[in-house]
Amino acid sequence: MRILKPITLPDGRLWRGRFDGLTRLLHWLTVAFVIFQFASGLSFETLEGTPTFPFLLMLHRTAGVALWLITLFRLCWRSSFATFPPFPIGLPHHMQWAAKLTEYALYGLLLLQPLSGLADTLLRGRPFALFLWTIPKLLPRQIEWSLFAHQLHEWGVWALMAVAGLHALAALFHHLVLKDDVLKAMLP
């Protein structure tokens, strides 16, 4: 990861730069996948038992795998080639620390959430659809562990939504209250 150097503009303002294009693309792609995952997961109870449900469940599982892979790629890109603007000048250290903590929590949840869903699926001991393929039964049915993994998956959803909401609110706070360019640095 490279941190850009701020540039002084002719009018005296500092321009911190923007996140590189691939970082921005992956960020917004992640947002779209998370919204889909949340919406599809919330609709399961309503659609269970309908002809639409198996297809939606396959899409949810497939999107979960894709989201996990995107997150891994984001972390690899971030650690090697990404360019980031520096924190705004004068941003207190506790706010910088909070931004980093929130970011790491998001990455952690984006990696753990699909794994808990996969564990729930595998521990049900049945074949399942993924990427338009049927994956055969890989583990014997272990209902207690499946229920535990399902509960972890549900808790993870709410933790992810809380941290993502906090992240979005912080971006809006920077834009509307602090009037800095934090939000603009990540916009497409």
Image (cartoon, helix red, strand yellow):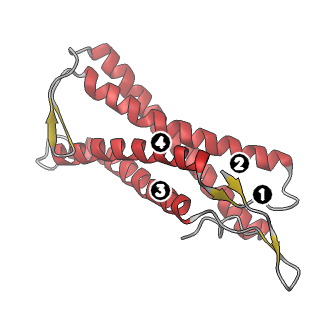
Q: Quadrant of residue 157?
A: top left
Residue with the mark numbered 4: 72
Q: Secondary structure at mark 4?
A: helix
The span from disc 4 to disc 1 (Cα, nearest Å) is: 24 Å
Q: Earlier in the sequence, mark 4 or mark 2?
A: 4
Indicate the amino acid at tag 1: Phe
Residue with the mark numbered 2: 99
The span from disc 3 to disc 4 (Cα, nearest Å) is: 15 Å
Identify the mark at residue 31; answer none if there is no mark: 3
Residue at 77%, 43% in the rendered image: 97
Identify the mark at residue 21; answer none if there is no mark: none
Q: Is residue 2 left or right of residue 160?
A: right
Indicate the amino acid at tag 3: Val
Which residue reaches farthest front?
80
Circles 2, 1 touching at the beta carbon (< 8 Å): yes
User: Mark 4, mark 1: which one is toward the viewer?
Assistant: 4
- Is residue 148 shown above or below 134? above
Q: Secondary structure at mark 3?
A: helix
Q: Earlier in the sequence, mark 1 or mark 3?
A: 3
Residue with the mark numbered 1: 87
Q: Earlier in the sequence, mark 2 or mark 1?
A: 1
